[in-house]
Image (cartoon, grey):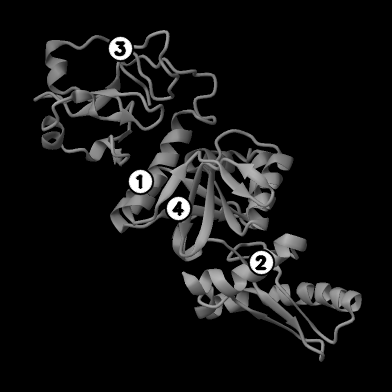
């Protein structure tokens, strides 16, 4: 967005269009508000114009709510103690945040995308938190957004700057072992531009491969569609066909990470059962999705059969379903006990 830095003339003031410097604000009770949806009459009822805070930095903001200009929010003048903020815009609309990597982590798009996604999730009744430390079996980490959708714990990683393969693998593997689905989200416009130019960065391939062979994208079209539908809609491409980008309802196509009961019968055949009460247990398509896993699971179970010398063995592998690339692992020790407990209790209790 190009900001006009010229002073306003008398005729310009009547048609003034404010820069969308602070697209999201937070009320004292912690409610997240899309600035474009805040009603003018609502704002005027407040005694203090510093009622709202910037959703990015948490600093109080001033409400510009005149009779001629559209309502918008702005930071107070900066001081030496002012917190750095990607949405801080100086007087006359001159950007004062670091422009060296405006689309990078904690840059304008990175923060805006997170809060747009959170707004949609909150609006559909899904509680979510941003940049909050989450403890897991592999240690603690801080995903961009964490929430639970249809019984599945989900971490959204909004990625707008290059990340190394080891870093992406570590984060995804840690979530996988903790039965959390990691969803990597990138800027849809930049992705499509790279596809058109044939210059897709290798780090995009990395996060797609660690994300079960699929890549999720976000832009304002996704936000508008999500608001109109009342649910989260995102663009998605697969590692097998990166040129094909589709807008889909996230909940209908979201990846699942869950333990399954895998049984190797004495006849040598393998069967898989979903946790009782799990949404996928009612979907024939999900049952068909595990068919490619049966051969690999059978090989692993046979090795365990030889090791434990049982006529057959029931185990609880953790599988990733509803993705372009299916994956599974056998947890060991405490993790294995945890998978068994979750199989029997978590889904039936929810």
Front position among marks 4 and 1: 1
How far apart, in angstroms, are the residues tagged by discs 4 and 3?
Answer: 35 Å
Q: Can the viewer see residue 63?
A: no
Which quadrant of the rendered structure holds the N terminus?
A: top left
The earlier-in-sequence mark between 4 and 3 is 3
In the picture provided, is 111 more to the left or to the right than 22? right
Depth order, front residue of 338/244: 338
What residue does disc 3 label?
A: 91
Q: Quadrant of residue 39?
A: top left
- Could you say whether the residue bearing mark 3 is in a helix, strand or loop? helix
Residue at 50%, 79% (x, y): give it.
282
Instruction: Count the labels in the image.
Output: 4
Name of the residue lying farthest toward the left: 67
Dot 1: within a 10 Å radius of its alpha carbon, few (fewer than 14), some, or many (20 or more) residues?
A: many
What residue does disc 4 label?
A: 234
What residue does disc 1 label?
A: 119
How far apart, in angstroms, are the residues tagged by discs 3 and 2?
Answer: 56 Å
What residue does disc 2 label?
A: 339
Front position among marks 4 and 2: 2
């Amino acid at each position: 967005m190009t900001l006009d830095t010229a002073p306003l003339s008398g005729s310009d003031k009547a048609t003034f269009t404010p820069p969308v410097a602070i697209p999201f604000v937070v009320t004292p009770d912690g409610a997240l508000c899309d600035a474009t949806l805040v009603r003018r009459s609502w704002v005027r009822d407040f005694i203090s114009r510093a009622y709202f805070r910037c959703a990015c930095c948490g600093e109080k903001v001033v409400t510009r709510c005149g009779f001629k200009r559209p309502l918008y929010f702005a930071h107070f003048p900066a001081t030496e103690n002012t917190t750095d903020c990607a949405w801080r815009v100086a007087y006359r609309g001159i950007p004062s945040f670091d422009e060296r990597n405006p689309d990078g982590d904690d840059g304008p798009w990175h923060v805006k995308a997170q809060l747009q996604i959170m707004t949609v999730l909150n609006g559909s009744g899904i509680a979510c938190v941003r940049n909050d430390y989450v403890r897991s079996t592999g240690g603690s980490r801080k995903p961009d957004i964490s929430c639970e959708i249809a019984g599945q714990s989900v971490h959204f990683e909004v990625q707008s700057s290059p990340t190394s393969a080891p870093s992406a693998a570590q984060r995804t593997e840690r979530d996988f072992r903790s039965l959390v689905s990691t969803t990597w989200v990138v800027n849809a416009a930049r992705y499509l531009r790279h596809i058109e130019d044939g210059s897709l960065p290798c780090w995009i391939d990395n996060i797609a491969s660690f994300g079960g062979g699929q890549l999720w994208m976000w832009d304002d079209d996704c936000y508008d569609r999500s608001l109109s539908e009342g649910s989260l809609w995102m663009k998605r491409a697969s590692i097998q066909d990166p040129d094909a980008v589709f807008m889909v309802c996230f909940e209908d196509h979201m990846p699942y990470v869950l333990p399954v009961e895998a049984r190797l019968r004495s006849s040598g055949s393998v069967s898989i059962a979903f946790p009782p009460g799990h949404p996928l247990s009612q979907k024939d398509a999900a049952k068909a999705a595990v068919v490619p896993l049966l051969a690999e699971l059978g090989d692993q179970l046979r090795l365990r059969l030889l090791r434990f010398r049982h006529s057959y063995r029931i185990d609880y592998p953790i599988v990733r379903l509803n993705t372009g690339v299916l994956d599974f692992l056998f947890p060991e020790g405490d993790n294995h006990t945890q998978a068994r407990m979750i199989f029997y209790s978590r889904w039936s209790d929810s």
